[in-house]
Each structure stands twice: as C-alpha cells, then as structure tokens.
Image: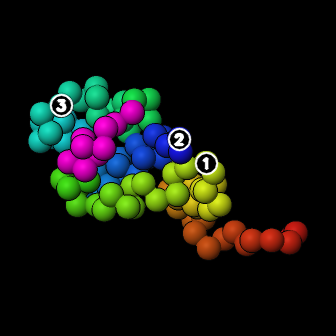
Amino acid sequence: MKLNYSIIGMRLKQARINKNITQEKLAEMLDLSVAYISRVERGSTEISLKRLVEVCDLLEVSLSYVLEDISPTSSSYLNKAFTELLETFPGTQGSLRTGGGM
C-alpha cells in the first residue's frame, strides 16, 4: 500500500495550527529542523512511523486520524480528501449536495 504523504502532512499541519504551535516550536520540541517539518507538512518527504507517532503524541491527535483512508486504493479516499479540502474554505460547509444535477 502506497501512502499519500501530502494528506498526512495536511492533517499534521492542521493539528499543529489547531494547537497554536508554530513550525519553529514543533521543530524545537522534536529536536528537528524547521525545514524538515515544512517538508513533512507539504508531503515532499516521507516521515517514519516512529517520528509520526512522536508528532501525533505532541499534537494530541491519534495516529489513526492521520493515517485514515490515505491510500488511493481505499474506497473513500477521494471523498474524504475533497471534504477536508472544502472544510478549509469559509461558507462551503453544507452547501454541496451529493448526486443528481442542479
């Protein structure tokens, strides 16, 4: 199973922002570089499971939340990714309907 590190990064970034922690502070807490944290959040580097567990613990999010439906082969992968993206835009929650036309 190939993991989508962009979604992992997006979820970690959102959890970090929700905790009001800067990339600099998180890097300091984990003894990592800010550049590494940035690459993980952008999905441009693969984070190890050990490091992912450390980040999740610090951000107080479950590993299952970060890893849920991140494989492009899972049936709800695209739906969840699209829904999460829409939730970042104000005024879109609940405005889209599934199925059918206009």
SS for callout 1: loop
- State which mark lies toward you, 2 or 1: 2
State if disc 3 and disc 1 touch (CB < 8 Å): no
Residue under circle 3? 32
Q: Amino acid at mark 1?
A: Pro
Q: Amino acid at mark 3?
A: Leu
Nearer the N terminus, badge 3 or badge 2? 2
Q: Which mark is residue 25?
A: none
- State which mark lies toward you, 1 or 3: 1
- State which mark lies toward you, 3 or 2: 2
Cα distance, mark 3 to mark 2?
Answer: 25 Å
Q: Amino acid at mark 2?
A: Lys
Q: x, y percentage for residue 89? A: 54, 57
Residue pictured at 86% horizontal, 72% vertical: 100
With respect to residue 44, does 100 lie above or below?
below
Nearer the N terminus, badge 1 or badge 3? 3
SS for callout 3: loop
Question: Quick check: is 91 in the magenta stretch?
Answer: no
Task: Report the span colored magenta.
Answer: 46-54
Q: Is residue 85 visible?
A: no
State if disc 1 and disc 2 touch (CB < 8 Å): yes
Residue under circle 1? 72
Secondary structure mostly seen in the magenta stretch: helix
Residue under circle 2? 2
Residue pictured at 53% horizontal, 41% vertical: 2
